[in-house]
Amino acid sequence: MKTILLIISALAFASVTRSASLISEAGVAYASISGVRTYSARGTNSSTSSLAIPFIRVSTDLTKNWLLGVSYSYIGNLDGTGLSPDADIFGDKDGFYVQMLTPYNCTEKIHELALDFRYAWQIADRLSFQFGPVASLFSSKATIANRSFSSTEVKFGAVADLRYDLTKKWQLAVGCRYSQPTDRKITQLTLSAAYRL
């Protein structure tokens, strides 16, 4: 949270010193998710293939056509199941044994802090198209078979959206995002509303 506030404050300072305005945005994404993060467990299968992801974003105009933005998304309740070796049952003196496999459940929650650099192309009077690269900081926490795991990593993705100016201050946007946290691929279809402060 401190990192988010620090970046938003930096954007606000940059916009004030350049007489630019901040754009605040909130929305939701329908995400298609493939892959599963197994950490040290093997044979884990994902049971979450799609998810609704809420997000917020703050951006500022660097120039007439370039924008810098920071966003936060919560990707929660990524569930999975698997089997893990648990114990050996010995059958006789010759050392015959049967390895038992114990079923387990896993749940992962991901916090994403993303920095994007976008080019804005004015298609028509009220219609614009934005696209650019995204650098994401993923903070992941998972519980697998009663064990806890966590990681922090930086990954790169891309974003593109179509924006319509409802008024001089309000925008409606639809778009898509692609990101790749470890062992996963996430494709998002986004819908959001933005307000120019």
Image (cartoon, rainbow, N blue to C red):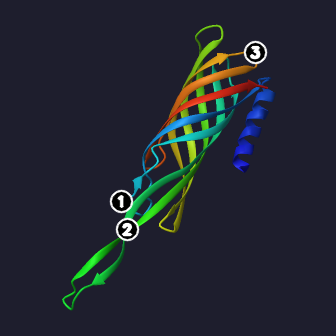
The CA distance from mark 2 to mark 1 is 8 Å
Q: Amino acid at mark 3?
A: Lys
Residue topped by disc 3: 168
Q: Which mark is residue 161?
A: none
Splitting the image into 4 quarters, where does residue 119 fall?
top right
Q: Residues within 10 Å of mark 3 (few under 14, many from 20)?
A: few
Splitting the image into 4 quarters, where does residue 6 fall?
top right
Say whether marks 2 and 1 touch (CB < 8 Å): yes
Q: Residue 162, percent across and down?
A: 57, 20
- Judged from the image, the secondary structure of the residue bearing numbered disc 2 is strand
Residue topped by disc 2: 84
Q: Residue 145, percent across and down?
A: 47, 67
Q: Earlier in the sequence, mark 3 or mark 2?
A: 2
Q: Nearer the viewer, residue 74 or 12?
A: 74
Query: Residue at position x 58%, y 40% from top?
Result: 53
Q: Residue 27, percent across and down?
A: 64, 33
Residue topped by disc 1: 43
Query: Residue at position x 77%, y 23% from top?
Result: 20
**Which callout, 3 or 2, points to the residue nearer the camera?**
2
Q: Amino acid at mark 2?
A: Ser
- Judged from the image, the secondary structure of the residue bearing numbered disc 3 is loop
Q: Amino acid at mark 1?
A: Gly
- Judged from the image, the secondary structure of the residue bearing numbered disc 1 is loop
Q: Earlier in the sequence, mark 2 or mark 1?
A: 1
